[in-house]
Amino acid sequence: GKLGYIEAACDWYSMKTQEHPYEAFRLMLNGELQYRWLYAGAYLTSGHYTQPMPNHSKIRVCDNLVINPYVGVNLSSITPLDTLQLQCGYLYTMSRDRYQYDVMTGYGVMLDFQAAKTFCKRHAVGVRNTFFYSENFMPMYYRFGVNLYRGHPFYRAKWYNRTELSADIVKFDFVDLRFSWVFHYVLGWKVGH
């Protein structure tokens, strides 16, 4: 509605079968309240991943929880730009390996800035910068990788900055063509696969 929104989703992206003995799904809840040019919201996701243990009759079960409350300011309506907003959020994560009774937590802060301008009705240019600082955000990535954690592995770094410059070359009701140039800067952790 006018004041905000709330949405929920379940992504069951791997079902256990005879050929594929893994099961994985993610539950997501997202909501936001808006008042004039201020907004506040939260994102919550809970991931679940199971895999059989080699040479064991037991199954390894892993969970990941992410909580991301945020606040922001959207000045798009009072500037000549189509988009001008700044958002700041806190991130908390908890990963659990039930087989080893191992629980690891982490936290972080994310700052996001966006600006865009449309010209000639069908073309636009924009910039988006996301700065991320964390302590132990994907602690079990080396064990479970993308099966447990969704998102870019750059978020495993202590300091990560992503800058995107974009241009909408074609923009019609039935097709959009966008060129984006993305710069990644990582500091503080080896993030190789």
Image (cartoon, helix red, strand yellow):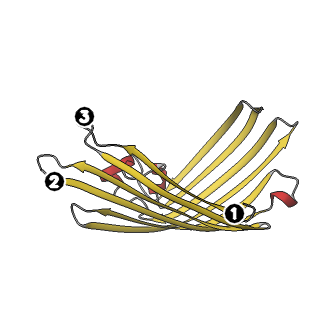
Circle 3 SS class: loop
Give the class, few, some or many, for how many residues have Cα within 10 Å of label 1's Cα (few <14, many ≥20). Answer: few
**Residue flagged by tag 3: what amino acid is it?**
Glu
Quadrant for residue 89, please give it.
bottom right
Disc 2 target residue: 58
Per the rendering, the mark at residue 4 is 1
Q: Position of residue 158 (x, y in %)?
A: 47, 61
**Earlier residue among tags 3 and 1:** 1
**Residue 79, picture quadrant:** bottom right
Residue at 36%, 54% in the rendered image: 141
**Observer-nearest residue: 58 or 180?**
58
Between 32 and 157, the one nearer to me in the picture: 32
Q: Disc 3 or 2, which lies upstream in sequence? A: 3
Which residue is label 3 attached to?
19
The spot of residue 132 in percent (x, y) is: 55, 60
Q: Secondary structure at mark 2?
A: loop
Residue 57 position within the rendered picture, expressed as x and y whole percent measured from the top left: 12, 50
| Distance Cα–Cα, label 3 vs label 1 | 44 Å
Crowding at mark 2 (Cα within 10 Å: few <14, some 14-19, many 20+): few
Mark 1 lies on a secondary structure that is strand
The N terminus: image quadrant: bottom right
Q: Amino acid at mark 1?
A: Gly
Alpha carbon distance from label 3 to label 2: 18 Å
The mark closer to the camera, 2 or 1, is 1
Name the residue: 80% across, 61% down.
Answer: 75
Above-or-below relation of 46 to 116: below
Pinpoint residue 180: horizontal percent, then vertical percent: 66, 38
Mark 2–mark 1 distance (CA, rounded to whole Å): 45 Å
